[in-house]
Image (cartoon, grey):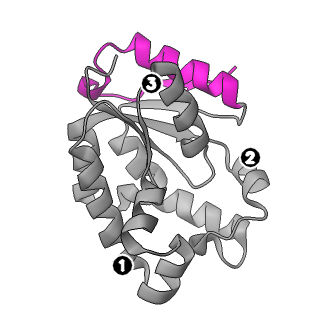
């Protein structure tokens, strides 16, 4: 299924990467890493504070360093940040060191989840910002992902579909296309 490689979860903010990642890691009996937590530990401050005090470029530098550190380990489920795919070197590292699963959740579901969220890139009009981020990132998620899971927000069902999708693809990191599955 994962042949000792990492399983990376990519997708929009609020797509379920962390929640599904924990569930998937428990099911597969693998360690779990949350890249956002690693970033905060490296910076010694919260992600909103990194953006406010150092800016997005500095955040992306820390994110790339955190990804490189996690990529050096094997056999983990890793929840990435939504913008990890913005840098070409991150996309290549993800694809080269693991199976990349894109959690593609409808924006309406993400908006319901993130209504009270304080993510820096969603400041202002969250619906407008989320749509703009999706337009910027969707093609990058598709380009980076080995597999795609449409997540409608039901965690147990999404976790079962993710496991089934990974099991149905014996060597997902060698896949050359994206497969779509709904969490029914």
Q: Is residue 150 left or right of residue 180?
A: right
Identify the residue at image location x=36%, y=61%.
86
Task: Quickly name the residue at label 3.
Answer: 179
User: Residue 63 appears at what percent x and percent y?
Assistant: 35, 64
State whether residue 173 is above or below residue 82: above
- Regarding residue 183, the answer to whether it shows in the image is no
User: Residue 77 appears at what percent x and percent y?
Assistant: 41, 35
Q: Does the magenta stretch include residue 180?
A: yes
User: Residue 16 appears at what percent x and percent y?
Assistant: 61, 43
In terms of sequence position, does the residue under pointer 2 or pointer 1 come before the other? 1
Around disc 2, counting alpha carbons within 10 Å, would you say few (fewer than 14), some (14 to 19), or many (20 or more)?
A: some
Identify the residue at image location x=72%, y=58%.
114
Local SS, label 3: loop
Closer to the camera: disc 2 or disc 1?
1
State whether residue 13 is above or below residue 44: above
Task: Quickly name the residue at label 2.
Answer: 109
Q: Is residue 79 magenta?
A: no
Within the image, what quadrant is residue 145 found in? top left
Local SS, label 2: helix
Within the image, what quadrant is residue 41 found in? bottom left
Local SS, label 1: helix
Closer to the camera: disc 3 or disc 2?
2
Task: Quickly name the residue at label 1.
Answer: 57
Which region is colored magenta?
Answer: 155-184
Identify the residue at image location x=51%, y=14%.
164
State whether residue 138 is above or below residue 168: below
Measured in 3D between alpha carbons, the distance from the residue under mark 1 to the one under mark 3, in whole angstroms, is 32 Å
- Regarding residue 59, the answer to whether it shows in the image is yes
Q: In this view, does 138 lie to the left or right of 161?
A: left
């Amino acid at each position: 299924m994962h042949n000792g490689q990492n399983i990376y979860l990519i997708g929009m903010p609020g797509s379920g990467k962390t929640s599904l990642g924990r569930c998937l890691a428990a099911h597969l009996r693998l360690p779990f890493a949350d890249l956002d937590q690693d970033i905060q530990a490296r910076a010694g401050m919260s992600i909103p504070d990194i953006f406010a005090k150092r800016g997005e470029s500095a955040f992306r530098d820390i994110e790339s360093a955190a990804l490189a550190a996690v990529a050096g380990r094997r056999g983990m489920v890793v929840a990435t940040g939504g913008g990890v795919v913005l840098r070409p070197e991150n996309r290549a590292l993800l694809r080269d060191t693991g199976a990349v699963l894109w959690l593609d959740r409808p924006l309406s579901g993400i908006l319901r989840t993130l209504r009270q969220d304080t993510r820096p890139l969603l400041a202002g009009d969250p619906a407008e910002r989320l749509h703009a981020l999706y337009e910027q990132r969707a093609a990058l998620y598709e380009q980076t992902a080995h597999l795609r899971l449409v997540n409608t927000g039901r965690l147990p069902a999404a976790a079962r579909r993710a496991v089934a999708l990974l099991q149905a693809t014996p060597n997902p990191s060698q896949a050359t296309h994206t497969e779509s599955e709904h969490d029914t």
